[in-house]
Image: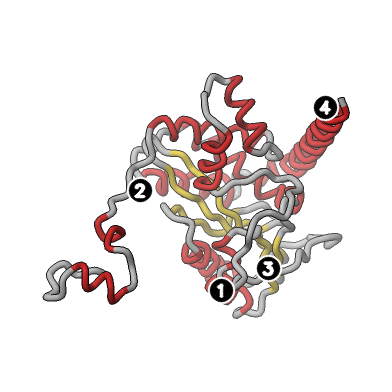
Amino acid sequence: MIDRSHPLSVKRQAELLNISRGAVYYLPKPTSQRDLVLMDAIDRLHLDFPFMGSRQLRSALRRQGHDAGRLRIRTLMRKMGISALAPQPGTSCRNPQHKVFPYLLRKLAIKRSNQVWALDTTYIRMARGFVYLTAVVDVNSRRILAHRVAITLEAVHAVEALQEAYARFGRPDIVNTDQGSQFTAQEFVDAVMGHGVQLSMDGRGAWRDNVFVERVWRSIKYERVYLRAYDSVSAARTDIAQYIRGFFFAGSRSLLVTHWSVESESAMQLTTNAFASYKKDTAMRRSE
């Protein structure tokens, strides 16, 4: 964007592009080791207790020996692209240019492959830094049809994964996502609806809508990511791709599908019970 060899000065180029001159010289700082350790702990807690917000995570992290304030935890959660999977007050502002689509899977019997695909993005830690994993999952078979590992949360990565899945497996009836900015972006919406596919989006805070994809993330992280310390983005891409080919696509995990479905339902019930208990305890404390 800025050409330092151009006859125009950097100042004048910045003025013409309507950007701050300070932004031209800004060099982003790498994530500190302290924050990486904290983000790893947050990620593990979020997998086990997805209903926890920044306040509860602060208490849980302190019990583990991590000293961090709620605002810091909230900042890191946003950086990781995660939030509490529980009903939230309507305080967040959505981009008015991004349309949110209704949830189409309620009471829908999913009985075949290519009926419903789900897309989601999750945080993946590395030895230094982190990346994001976006995957296309067939809801019926639980197979990962395509995926992308990237350093940013942009719609282009989700679009690339979706187009790869189209090329290899055809088109589904419905694509379901959460309300993340990469999925509400017009580029992604066009990639779905432009192929005659219906777009469905989870309700805000409705963690049950995406429970099976969350189960995929749990498997990948506990069975692979947490056992590794990736030293580069390419190493993360290669290792995660190898795991997905071996367990979620090649069929070696197919014998576990029935067990996995039962386990997912059990995990959902446990989380429901835990959240109900939390609400009851909170109500009792407020009444005291």
Categorize mark 2 by other alpha carbons within 10 Å: few (<14), some (14-19), many (20+). few
Mark 4 → mark 2, Cα distance in angstroms: 49 Å
Categorize mark 1 by other alpha carbons within 10 Å: few (<14), some (14-19), many (20+). some
Residue linked to disc 2: 234
Q: Which mark is residue 100?
A: 3
Of the numbered discs 1 and 4, the one sitting upstream in the chain is 1
Q: Which amino acid does label 1 sit on?
A: Gln
Residue linked to disc 4: 285
Going by the image, does 90 lie left or right of 164? Answer: right
**Label 2 close to label 3 by CB (< 8 Å):** no
Q: What residue type is labelled 2?
A: Ser
Mark 2 → mark 1, Cα distance in angstroms: 29 Å
Q: Where is residue 266 in the image (x, y as percent from the top left)?
A: 79, 37
Q: In which quarter of the image is the C terminus?
A: top right
Q: In which quarter of the image is residue 216?
A: top right
Q: What residue type is labelled 3?
A: Val
Residue linked to disc 1: 186
Task: Write the residue at 53% across / 59% down.
Answer: 146
Identify which residue, 104 or 246, lies in the foreground: 104
Mark 3 → mark 1, Cα distance in angstroms: 11 Å
- Nearer the viewer's eye, disc 2 or disc 3? 3
Task: Write the residue at 55% across / 37% down.
Answer: 73
Mark 3: secondary structure: loop
Mark 1: secondary structure: helix
Of the numbered discs 4 and 3, the one sitting upstream in the chain is 3
Q: Mark yes or no: residue 222 visible.
A: no
- Nearer the viewer's eye, disc 4 or disc 3? 4
Q: Quadrant of the N terminus?
A: bottom left
Of the numbered discs 3 and 1, the one sitting upstream in the chain is 3
